[in-house]
Structures are given as C-alpha cells and as structure tokens.
Image (cartoon, rainbow, N blue to C red):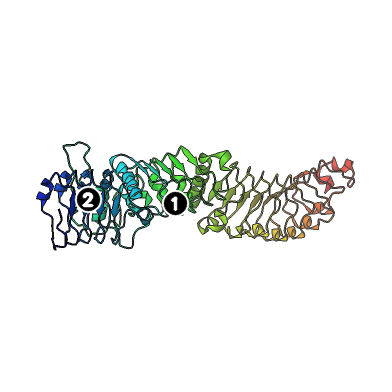
C-alpha cells in the first residue's frame, strides 16, 4: 500500500485492520503520529515514514515483529523508543536527517544492528533493573539513562568514556523525550495487553531542573546527572579513559551502592565525596595511576580510604585530624592546598605512615599548633614547615632527617620540639630564637654539639634529651639553663665533665 506524496496529515486507524499488509509507503506527507492500530500489522516487512512531520515513534511499532525496513529519515523524531528493539528482524533502519538525541551518535553511526543492541539494553533495563551498555564505544554517558532511576546495576565497561558526567544535548530534553524512554504506558509482557503512546501533559517543557527524587540526605538533585540513579547497587566502568569521577553524585548513593569497579582507567585522584559510600562492600581500582589519597589501597582497602576521608571531613569543623597508621605515602595535600583546612586545622597527627616528604607549601597552615610526624620516612624538613608560626608542639621522631633549616627560628611559640631517632649531626644557630621552648628532645641522633651556643638563649628549657648521640663533652651553655629539671645524656662517650660530676645530677653539672 502506497500513499506517498499526498500531503496526508494523519494515517487512518483502519489501516491496522489490513492484517496481511506487508509493505506500507507513507513517505513525503505531513503525518505527525503513528496510530496505535499499527500494533496489529505483525506481517509488515517494510514501513516508510520518511519526510514527514513525525515527532514520536509510537512504541507499538515494537509489535511489528516481521519488520525488516523502517525508514524515518527527514522527520522530527528526537528519541527512538526502547520497544523498537522487539523488531528483531529489522535490518534497515534509516534515521538520517533527524534531530535525534538518543541513541547517541557513537551508536547510530554504526548502523541498525548496533542501534537495536542499544535499544535492547534500554528496554531490558526498563523491564528489569539492570542496564548493560558495555562495548558501545561511548565517549560520553547517555543522558537518557538518568531517567531510569529504578535501575540497580549499571555496566559501562569497555567504552571510551573520559568522565561520568552525562552529556545533555544542545536542544534541552523535553518531557516528551523523557516519556519515550520511561513513559507512553508500561510495556506489557502479556499477549492480550498492548502499549500505546500517551503524550505528556506538557510535551515541550524542559525536563527539570531538579529530579524530584528523594534520598535520605538529599531531597532533590539536578536532572541528567548520574546521581539521579538513586537505586544503584552496582556500578562498573572498567576499561575506559576516565580521568575523574563525579564526586557530587556519590552522596546520592550513600545507602544503595555496594559495588564499584573503576579498573583500568586514567584516574589520578579519588574524590573525597566517596566517603559517603557507607554501604560499599566491593571496590576495585587496579590499573589507575591514583596518587591521591596517598594510601596504599592494595594493602589497606576501601575501609581505610573511607576512614581517611571521614577524618578529613570532620576536620573541616573541628580543626583536629588524626591520620595515624594509614600507610600514607605522601603528606596529604588537602591540608596545604584547601583553605578550608589550611586556615582551620590546629592539630594534625600523621604518625605511623610511610611519608617521605613534607608538603613544600604547608606554610599555608596558618592555624596549626600541634604537628606529629613520628614514625615516617622523612629525610628532609622543608623551610615551609617552620613558617607555620603558630606551632606550639612539633614531634618528628623516628624518621631519617639529617638537617634542620634556619627557618626553624620563625617558630618562636614552640614549647616542645622533638626529633628523636633521626640522623641529625648539627643544629642551626637560629634555634636561639626559640626562647619559649620548655621541652627539647634530640635522643638517638649523631650530634656532637661542639658549637651549640644557641642553648644559652633557651632559658625556659625544663627538659633536655641528648642521650645516645656522639658528644664527647657537654655544651658549656647548659650552665645557663636555670630552669632545667630533666637531662638525659646516657649513651655518649663523654669526657667532660668527668663522670663523677655527671653522676651528681643536674645541679652539679650546671
């Protein structure tokens, strides 16, 4: 049957009564809608609707199970319905010259087979709870998947994604576009039931701006974001080219996401927002050049990562942070680079890690009063550390430090300074500025203190540990330390003063 080039504005529903019809040519008209009766044309093999005013492909086309050719070129359709995937015999689908928003170009340019595969994935997700879009060569996350908020498993493995921010078309998606994916009546699984297109109340209204989906901690969220998939339990994005993860989305998955796989991408930094993933049980990120957080993930696992983030998150309000024994490989850069922390944190404990270098820009930590870097692998202390002029207590025991910079003299508020069990051979003369120092601990180093006149300025000193060094004589300046109450000097090959005087105690030595 051919009614081509007749300026028809609609197709009479009685066409659906031609049950034996095999070919129908309706091209070159003004047709805007496909009648629901087309669901009965189960023997139709070719349907031409190209060059019409068609804006929606009625999902009932999915019942046309014998269809092999469907031409929709030069129409106004913006979305292909997932139900089209039921046309399993379709080999020639033409959509050129249409303002198509979905499927994405990466799919449509590969032809009919790939288009049907893509639509099949959407339809299976629409009927069930799993969306598998692996191996589609996608360069961006399709925006339409965010409408499938009921989906619990999303697979985007083996694509070419650089990030997980869905790409919204220049022509903003409308309620009609959304209805093609999720609406039009639910697809019926029983033979006696049918589906037809139901036009939304406001078809041309832009979707959004918020999704209206409520989660425990976020009542609503901007549309067309991965966070709209509020029921996700499993998310896998392996073997892509992803550089960054969509941090703000993770708070939307706080009570749902249990499995996250991001292996073999290009991710260098994991977003702090991941600390909200309280239910996450399985996480893998092999094959990524992750440098931050500076945790040995293979050893520590995600619970340690989450603990790291949660402690930093708490520091935003308390100003106190303990990141002890977390296998940190470098000094966490947040403290130096994020003003919310650098101007807030007063207490920082990074003891028991594998840190080799202190951040060279940590002089931004203008509020820092207590810093503990014990039991690390630090070899050098940058001058920037001693420009944290609010420091009161500094512990850097059990490291590999050989030298202290002259800038130590800037920390005039220091009351405790401890560098036990390092490799110090000398101390800078600038330490004579530390006039408020009450506790100085330098045990187990390589000090000779042959020239240590700065000690004479430390008149408030009450505790001085110099045991297990390489001194042969006690510094004369010790005689000026009138407030000294505790002195440790064992483990030195002292010749001056004589042992008899040393055994008499501090007062006699002084």
Q: Give the residue displayed 37% in from the left and 53% down from the top.
A: 110
For the residues labelled 2 and 1, the Cα–Cα distance comes to 47 Å
- Mark 1 and mark 2 in contact (Cβ < 8 Å)? no
Question: Which of 25 and 57 lies nearest the eye of the viewer?
Answer: 25
> According to the image, label 1 marks what residue?
247
- Looking at the rendered structure, the secondary structure element under dot 2 is strand
Does 456 sit left or right of 201 as displayed?
right
Q: Quadrant of residue 428?
A: bottom right
433 is higher (above) or lower (below) than 130: below
Question: Which of 59 and 331 lies nearest the eye of the viewer?
Answer: 59
Which of the numbered marks, if any, corresponds to residue 46?
Answer: 2
Q: Of discs 2 and 1, which sits in the foreground?
A: 2
Residue 197 shows in this picture: no
Label 1, residues with CA under 10 Å away: few <14, some 14-19, many ≥20: some
Residue 203 x, y percent position in the rendering: 21, 57
Q: Give the residue displayed 25% in from the left and 58% down from the top.
A: 77
Residue 120 x, y percent position in the rendering: 32, 44
Question: Which of 160 and 366 lies nearest the eye of the viewer?
Answer: 160
């Amino acid at each position: 049957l051919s009614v081509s080039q007749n300026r028809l504005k609609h197709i009479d529903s009685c066409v659906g009564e031609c049950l034996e019809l095999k070919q129908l040519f309706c091209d070159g008209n003004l047709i805007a809608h496909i009648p629901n009766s087309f669901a009965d044309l189960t023997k139709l093999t070719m349907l031409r609707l190209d060059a019409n005013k068609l804006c929606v492909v009625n999902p009932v086309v999915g019942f046309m199970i014998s269809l092999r050719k469907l031409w929709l070129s030069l129409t106004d359709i913006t979305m292909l319905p997932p139900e089209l995937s039921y046309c399993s015999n379709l080999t020639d689908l033409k959509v050129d010259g249409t303002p198509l928003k979905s499927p994405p170009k990466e799919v449509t340019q590969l032809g009919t087979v790939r288009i049907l595969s893509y639509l099949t994935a959407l339809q299976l997700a629409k009927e069930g709870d799993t969306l598998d879009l692996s191996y589609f060569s996608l360069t961006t996350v399709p925006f339409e998947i965010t409408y499938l908020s009921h989906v619990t498993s999303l697979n985007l493995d083996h694509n070419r994604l650089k990030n997980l921010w869905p790409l919204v078309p220049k022509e903003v998606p409308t309620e009609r576009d959304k209805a093609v994916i999720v609406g039009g009546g639910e697809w019926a699984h029983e033979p006696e039931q049918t589906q037809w297109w139901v036009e939304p109340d406001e078809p041309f209204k832009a979707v959004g701006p918020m999704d209206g989906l409520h989660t425990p901690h976020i009542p609503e969220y901007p549309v067309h974001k991965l966070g709209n998939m509020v029921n996700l339990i499993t998310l896998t994005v392996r073997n892509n080219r992803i550089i960054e993860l969509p941090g703000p989305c993770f708070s939307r998955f706080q009570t749902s996401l249990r499995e996250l796989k991001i292996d073999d991408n290009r991710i260098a930094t994991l977003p702090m927002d991941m600390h909200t993933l309280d239910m996450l049980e399985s996480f893998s990120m092999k094959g990524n050049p992750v440098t931050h957080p500076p945790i040995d993930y293979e050893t520590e696992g995600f619970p340690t990562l989450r603990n790291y983030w949660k402690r930093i998150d708490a520091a935003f309000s308390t100003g106190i942070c303990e990141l002890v024994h977390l296998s940190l490989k470098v000094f966490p850069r947040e403290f130096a680079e994020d003003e919310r922390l650098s101007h807030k944190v007063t207490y920082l404990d990074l003891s028991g890690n594998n840190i080799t270098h202190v951040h060279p820009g940590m002089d931004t930590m203008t509020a820092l009063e207590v810093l503990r870097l014990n039991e690390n692998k630090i070899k050098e202390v940058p001058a920037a550390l001693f420009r944290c002029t609010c420091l009161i207590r500094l512990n850097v025991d059990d490291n590999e430090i050989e030298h202290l910079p002259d800038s130590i003299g800037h920390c005039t508020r220091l009351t405790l300074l401890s560098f036990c069990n390092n490799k110090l051979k000398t101390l800078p003369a600038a330490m004579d500025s530390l006039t408020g120092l009450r506790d100085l601990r330098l045990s187990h180093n390589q000090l000779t203190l042959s020239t240590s006149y700065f000690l004479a300025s430390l008149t408030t000193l009450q505790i001085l540990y110099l045991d297990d060094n390489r001194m042969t004589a006690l510094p004369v300046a010790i005689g000026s330390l009138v407030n000294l109450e505790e002195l440790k000097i064992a483990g030195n090959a002292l010749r001056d003063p004589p042992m008899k005087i040393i055994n008499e105690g501090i007062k006699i030595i002084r």
